[in-house]
Amino acid sequence: MRRIPHKRIDRRAFNAFTLIELLVVVAIISILAAVLLPALTRVKQQVSGTQCMNNLRQIGLACRLYADDYEDVLPPGWFSPPVCRMPGSCRAT
C-alpha cells in the first residue's frame, strides 16, 4: 500500500481573523452603541431629576428644622430683610 503524503497546513491561516470578520465585529459593536446611547441619555436625565428632587427635599427639611428651633420663623432669604421679633426694633438697611 502506498502512503499518501499529507499536505502541510499553515496554522496561521486558521488562527487569524480575516478583514471581513473584523469589519463585521466593528459594525455590530457600532450598532449596539447606537442603540444604547439614547437609552443611557434618558437614564442620565432621570438621575439628574431625582437628584434635583432630593436636593429640594433636603432644603425643605432644613427649613422645617430651622423653624422648629426658632419659634416657627423660617430662615432669612438671600435678599430678604432681617427677621425682627419685636416691632420697631429692626431698621431696614
Image (cartoon, rainbow, N blue to C red):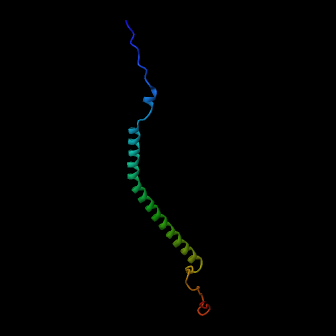
Q: Is residue 16 depicted above or below 42 in this figure?
A: above
Q: For residue 68, which quarter of the picture?
A: bottom right
Residue at screen point 39% across, 42% down: 23
Residue at (39%, 10%) from the top-left corner? Answer: 3
Q: Position of residue 40 (x, y in %)?
A: 43, 56
User: Is the N terminus in the top left, top right, bottom left or bottom right quadrant?
Assistant: top left
> Viewer-proximal residue, 71 or 7?
7
Q: Please tell me how many numbered marks the rendered image carries.
A: 0
Q: Quadrant of the C terminus?
A: bottom right
Asked if residue 30 is positioned above or below residue 44 in the image, the reply reads above
Rendering quarter of residue 9: top left
Q: Position of residue 78 (x, y in %)?
A: 56, 80
Residue name at image x 39 percent, y 52 percent: 34
- Residues 46 and 25: in front is 25
Given residues 5 and 39, the one toward you in this image is 5
Residue at far top of view: 1
In this view, the residue farthest toward the bottom is: 88
Residue at image location 41% in from the left, 19% down from the top: 7
Near-viewer residue (20 or 45): 20
Q: Residue 12: horizontal and vertical position, in percent?
A: 46, 29
Residue 39 at x, y percent in the picture: 40, 56
